Image (spheres, rainbow, N blue to C red):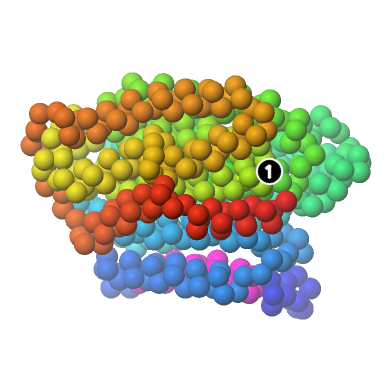
Amino acid sequence: MDLSRYFTLADISGIAPEIVLTIAALSVLTVEMMRVSRPGINLMVAAAGLLVAGVFAAQGFKEEILFGGMLRLNKISLFFDFLYLAVAFGTLILSQGYLEKKGGKPRGEYHALILFCVIGMMLMTEANDLVIVFLGLELLSLSLYILVGFLRHDVLSNESGLKYLFLGAFSTGFFLFGAALIYGAAGTTNYNEIASVVASGEILSYLYLSLGIGLLLIGFAFKVALVPFHLWSPDVYQGAPTTVTAFLCTAPKAAGFGALLNIFIVAFPEIQIEWQKLFWILAALTMTIGNISALMQSHVKRMLAFSSVSHAGYLVLGVLVLNSVGLSAVLFYLVVYSAMNLGAFAILLLVEKDGKGLNFKDYRGFATQHPWMAVAMAVFMISLAGFPPTGGFIAKYGLLSSAVAEGYIWLVVIAVLNTLVSAYYYLRLIVNMYMQEEKDISNPVSGVLVLGLIGFLAVIVLILGITPEFLLNITTEAATTAF
């Protein structure tokens, strides 16, 4: 069989990072099967796979179309690849010792599933065809379903896994039906060909096309937790292992927005204007309902879950604007958002013990007993609220200023008011740590790697708030090449 008819050496070299991650994941599983698995060995193999994949992504990068138009490599996809690799690396570090702490035992499939998630996310943002998006989405989703319910002896983890599985499968059906309708209307699932058919007016049915785009949006809205498709997130975030929650609310959310932006930039550039009113409503509802719901929480993980919903609303502003300035703001926001959420959940998992350490009242007097961790948590909370001098302020300012430039004044007013509302529940945690009567708190058990990662993330959040030029130059260059 002449395989060159289907793919070339350039195609294979273009997906070298995915191949490396697949080999690393299979290696972890092989070590587990041979019963010589140890937490340190699993971490080293998985981390080595992530690092080597990053090297291949950087060294072998060039803008090209692969597999006959199925995949597109550009600076945007490269940016997202490095974001996924970084978040996965941080998650693996945080996971060291966590499963044992929760009463389980280290299992190699955990590390392998994280790597498979990264492969799925890479495919989603490198896709130039709806079929590839679906394949990446399924690989990501199936891996996350297992990770969310990974603690088999924990009732909450099992419940979260089932909820996420059922609702996730339902939302995937919407996405697949939408892709089928778009194929029926345009006669293709390739982004460039869809754009060409739309531009030439050769669409067979604009009704089917509109219904298809709407169903695609429902699928993506579930994945990134936009209102009213967000109700799964608080229960899943609360019940999932904290390390998985940290991963779930960062990288997969970035992948969802990356794939959504890519579809509208390449496949539907002329149609996006017709959907602006819907994006306006989605942004306003998601910001408002997310923040109001977070106000009423006494559980920190549930508060952060609704906080994640509200931040998804801010990110919709970038989809609404959809120009190089707005896209650059979205990319910057996703980096800062990932850093501050990963850091906040890292502190939560250190304090968490026997079901305690997850409520606001559990942090009373936390600053007295653990001053450095309290400082780091305060930095993350202030950044999530969007206050200077943190990266969260610069990220929010970039999104809001891009929306103002396009004339979305009232939506920006809603966003600013929601930012003021969010300050209450973020500062509430700081007040408990610094201004409430001291309460006995279990001493966090952690390694040097985890504490070092928390400190590193706190420094990154501050640096991006004081001198954001380096990252802004990268995001601006990547965004400019997308249009």
What's the residue at 27%, 40% (across, down)? 378
Which quadrant, please, contains the N terminus?
bottom right
Q: Which residues are magenta?
A: 12-32
Please name whichever residue, 43 or 263, is drawn nearer the observer in this view of the structure: 263
- Residue 295 against residue 324 in the figure, above or below: above
In the rendered image, which residue does mark 1 sit on? Answer: 323
At which x and y percent is residue 259?
A: 62, 48
Q: Residue at x 71, y 46 (%)?
A: 265
* Element at label 1: loop
Mark 1, other Cα within 10 Å: few <14 / some 14–19 / many ≥20? some
x%, y% of residue 386?
41, 36
Question: Magenta stretch containing residue 31, yes or no?
Answer: yes
- Residue 132, position in %: x, y? 66, 54
Residue 239 seen in render: no
Q: Is residue 141 left or right of residue 423?
A: right
- In front of the other: 305 or 311: 311
Residue found 49% across the figure and 26% down from its top = 416
Q: Nearer the viewer, residue 135 or 233?
A: 233
Amino acid identity at mark 1: Asn
Can residue 77 be seen?
yes
Q: Horizontal and vertical percent for residue 394?
A: 47, 43
Left or right: residue 145 compared with residue 93: right
